[in-house]
Image (cartoon, coloured by chain):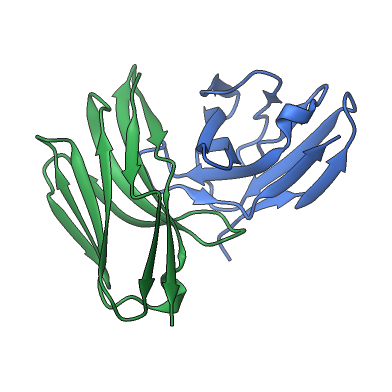
């Protein structure tokens, strides 16, 4: 069964610091990997998407990397802000029978303290 | 404004009383999906629809039904709700499939007593 494992489960950092979240997956055949940000009580919002041939993608202070060989991805947040406090979800899609099947990680809960 | 709407946002009901959670999108998206989110388990897909009249089971379809009679609407039906269906439910849509960016609704918090 395809799996997406995220670490750490939760993280507390001070405002202005950088942090890196990890995502390891076993999904195959791999189609793409997305990182979503989910604020408390709201639906997830897409931050980045990467396909097999891409190994880095940035969206402002968010930078995602992908190593398709080791099946690992990371999300780096630079100069964190209080508004970065949220859950970050890694989603890996496989192409199966003409359909894209997403597998969701359980998320990393990030708290940014002033 | 492009959006996915869900109703109701909050619902408390009793075991066995049929209920429907509506989902509507105004982006002309082909793909729609329902997820439930439980603490420590993350988002799990219940059902998805690739287009009108085309629906398929996700990871946790038991106890749920869906229909896709129109492109914009994708209601989630619980024929006989049970307490283990207490959860936070999200509807999402995307242009063609789940590999495209999914736009999520605001969520429906359901409690079954």
Residues B87 and B89: in front is: B87
Residue B33 horizontal/vertical position (percent)? 55, 36
Q: Colour of chain B?
A: blue
Q: Is residue B24 above or below residue B34?
A: below
Q: Residue at x 71, y 35 (%)?
A: B75
Residue B74 horizontal/vertical position (percent)? 66, 36
Residue B96 horizontal/vertical position (percent)? 42, 38
Among the 4 quarters of the image, the one containing residue A71: top left
Q: Is residue A95 above or below residue A21?
A: above
Q: Residue at x 9, y 34 (%)?
A: A69
Q: Colour of chain A?
A: green
Quadrant of the snapshot with the N terminus of chain A: top left
Residues B42 and B58: in front is: B42
Report whether A13 appears left or right of B72.
left
Quadrant of the snapshot with the C terminus of chain A: bottom left
Q: Is residue A43 above or below residue A12?
A: above
Report whether A21 appears left or right of B32.
left
Among the 4 quarters of the image, the one containing residue A67: top left
Report whether A7 appears left or right of B113.
left
Report whether A57 appears left or right of A9.
left
Res. B51 in view: no
The image shows a total of numbered marks equal to: 0
Residue A87 horizontal/vertical position (percent)? 46, 56
């Amino acid at each position: 069964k395809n799996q997406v494992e995220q670490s750490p489960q939760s993280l507390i950092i001070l405002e202005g610091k950088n942090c890196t979240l990890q995502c390891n997956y076993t999904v195959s055949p791999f189609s793409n990997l997305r990182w979503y940000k989910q604020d408390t009580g709201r639906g997830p919002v897409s931050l980045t998407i990467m396909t097999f041939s891409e190994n880095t993608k940035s969206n402002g202070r968010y930078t995602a990397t992908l190593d398709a060989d080791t099946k690992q991805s990371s999300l780096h947040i630079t100069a964190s802000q209080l508004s970065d406090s949220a859950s970050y979800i890694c989603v890996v899609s496989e192409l199966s029978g003409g359909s894209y099947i997403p597998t969701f990680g359980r998320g990393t809960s990030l708290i940014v303290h002033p | 404004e492009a959006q996915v709407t869900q109703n109701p946002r909050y619902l408390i009901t009793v075991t066995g009383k049929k209920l429907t959670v509506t989902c509507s999108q105004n982006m002309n998206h082909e793909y729609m999906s329902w997820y439930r989110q439980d603490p420590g388990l993350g988002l799990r897909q219940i059902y998805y629809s690739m287009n009108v009249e085309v629906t398929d089971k996700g990871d946790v379809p038991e106890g749920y039904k869906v229909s896709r009679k129109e492109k914009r609407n994708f209601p989630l039906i619980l024929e006989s709700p049970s307490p283990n269906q207490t959860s936070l439910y999200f509807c999402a849509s995307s242009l063609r499939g789940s590999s495209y960016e999914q736009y999520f609704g605001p969520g429906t918090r359901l409690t079954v007593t």
